[in-house]
Amino acid sequence: MCGIVGYIGKRQCAPILLDGLGRLAYRGYDSAGMAVLTEGKIQVIKAKGRLSVLEERTKNGTTVEGSIGIAHTRWATHGEPSDVNSHPHISQSGKFAVVHNGIIENYRKLRTFLTEKGFTFMSETDTEVFAHLIEYYYNGNLVETMWKVMRKIEGSYALGVLCDDYPDSFLAVRKDSPLIVGIGEGENFIASDVPAILKYTKKVCYLEDNEIVVLKKDNVTVYNADGETIDKEICTINWDVASAEKGGYEHFMFKEIMEQSKALQDTIHPRIKDGEIVLDNIVLTSEYLNSVDKIFIVACGSAYHVGVAGKYVIESLVGKPTEVDLASEFRYRNPIVTDRTLIIIISQSGETADTIAAMREAKRLGGRVISIVNVVGSTIAKESDEVLYTWAGPEIAVATTKAYSTQLACMYLLGIYMSQKLGKLSDAEQKALVAAVKALPEAVEKILSCRENVQFMASRFYNSKNIFFIGRNLDYAVALEGSLKLKEISYIHSEAYAAGELKHGTISLIEDGTLVVAPATGERLFDKMLSNIREVKARGAVVMAIAAEGNTAIAEEADYCLYVPKTHPLLTPSLTVIPMQLFGYYVASIKGCDIDKPRNLAKSVTVE
Ligand code: F6R
């Protein structure tokens, strides 16, 4: 989704803005631009296409004078990607320039209103409304004007505003869209995400909805929704620029796949003490847990797939009815939530629009929300009742890998924690499960070290037109993720099915040579899975199974088999997913796809 960077200080701002935009490129974009205040006048440079167009046009920013500026990468929502639809947008007189991330829902009404007032629109975007509306209501005081404008706007926005009346400051505001403020020495920043400014400062504060910030080079002033100035907590980021760089790897996705053992260790190990799970920020008493009559797990995309696995895990460990739902469905389907409902929200970014809305709906209905989130200070982390962080570090590739793995780990930790409170497991069961969770990082490392086997499979099947993934129970949950990983980055059509469901229709798509990936780690349903493998083979499929080491029976049925270390039956997705991620990655790599920025996708889906 769109990325915003803003700078004020002593240095020439254009190179800093371009560098920041480059670090936000992972979010996905189709055009870019910047507005810089040069000798009291706003200069706008913007273009459709890659950032390199802007870099070439400005000689990496060196030809643009000025030390106050705002910049933007656009991911088109209203109007096609084009020079004119790119941000920044300027007001009719050229006095104001704005960059915007989000969607203005009532923009048609406002556009008509402004057109009647004599404003001429240059673009098809909703954002241009912001620029003209600010100009229409401007009374010489930009903060006051912004209050008025915000009251007229319905929708979500992170907004940066430059005004030529203010040669030593600029303004920003957010509602339902992420925006951080970076505090430097004699220079300050705004950005959609930390990597954009990390090279210059590690001190950030997180804006809340409806807060306005006015940035000068030596100070920032934040106003709350009542117009009062407030002191914001300044947080120090505990990771460095290198964590958000490729570090010699060809793609962020591959780097992040390879980082999974470490990410799992950081997420799991500090939370195991004397064989028990200790979750510092979460206090679920046995009394409360006994009162819970329903658990929902709500998320989007891969995080939803964690939820599908989580349902099996929580039901088996905690013994409470657990329902998993897509956030975009949950928010609009009148879910039955009471004060006895526990809602687990999962999100890497903590900024996914549908997931935020689902969380707010769950809270409004009286439920208690625990979130599993990667980005510290994100909206979901702040608004949920309790948060369990995945310590995955920054995830840059659009296709999630290490965030998925650490979310899954958090799901295990939470499940065991709740079962401890309810006394559901015997000492021996608890000990075995906790030891198996603790051993996951090492097992993942072992699978990664055998990645050549997966690379070979990718070289064999990269030309496929359709690939199916089938599994049962937890193997089904992970099949969903394996299929998504493959299709989103390699553009090969792929579907995941519960193996028992295939013959209810989809099996008609299997023909000679169709690859079927069959995770078959579940011992209880192993024989049934073998039958399903035989069914697809009988129709011409080529089967690539994924099974636990030592399982020789599978080799007799499947055409190929990838092995993962044996683990506790509830934990198999954490291992099975690794060859699937690698398979998607290698297939996309052989096909020459833009792996870190797949077409049409954005890292953080901050609009509905
Ligand atoms: C797929 C992927 C997406 C995200 C989804 C939710 O590889 O990354 O499906 O999982 O957009 O994003 P978050 O977790 O940020 O809420």
Image (cartoon, rainbow, N blue to C red):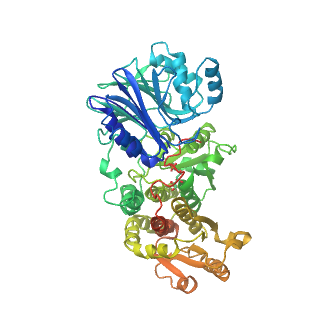
Q: Is residue 54 visible?
A: yes
Residue for point 58% across, 47% down: 342
Q: Is residue 318 visible?
A: no
Query: In which quadrant of the rendered view does residue 558 lie?
Result: bottom right
The number of callouts visible is: 0
Q: Give the left or right position of residue 400, taking residue 41 as reference.
A: right
Query: In which quadrant of the rendered view does residue 248 lie?
Result: bottom left
The extreme bottom residue here reads 556
Residue for point 44% across, 54% down: 397
Instruction: Estimate the x, y position of residue 147 in percent, counting from the top left.
Output: 51, 20
Q: In which quadrant will I find the C terminus?
A: top right
The extreme front residue here reads 57
Q: 476 or 466, which lies in front?
A: 466
The extreme top residue here reads 139
Instruction: Estimate the x, y position of residue 6 in percent, counting from the top left.
Output: 38, 33
Q: Is residue 442 above or below residue 246?
A: below
Q: Is residue 459 above or below residue 484?
A: below
Query: In which quadrant of the rendered view does residue 363 lie?
Result: top right
Instruction: Estimate the x, y position of residue 364 in percent, counting from the top left.
Output: 61, 37
Q: 490 or 224, which lies in front?
A: 490
Residue for point 51% across, 19% down: 135
Instruction: Estimate the x, y position of residue 64 in percent, counting from the top left.
Output: 33, 32
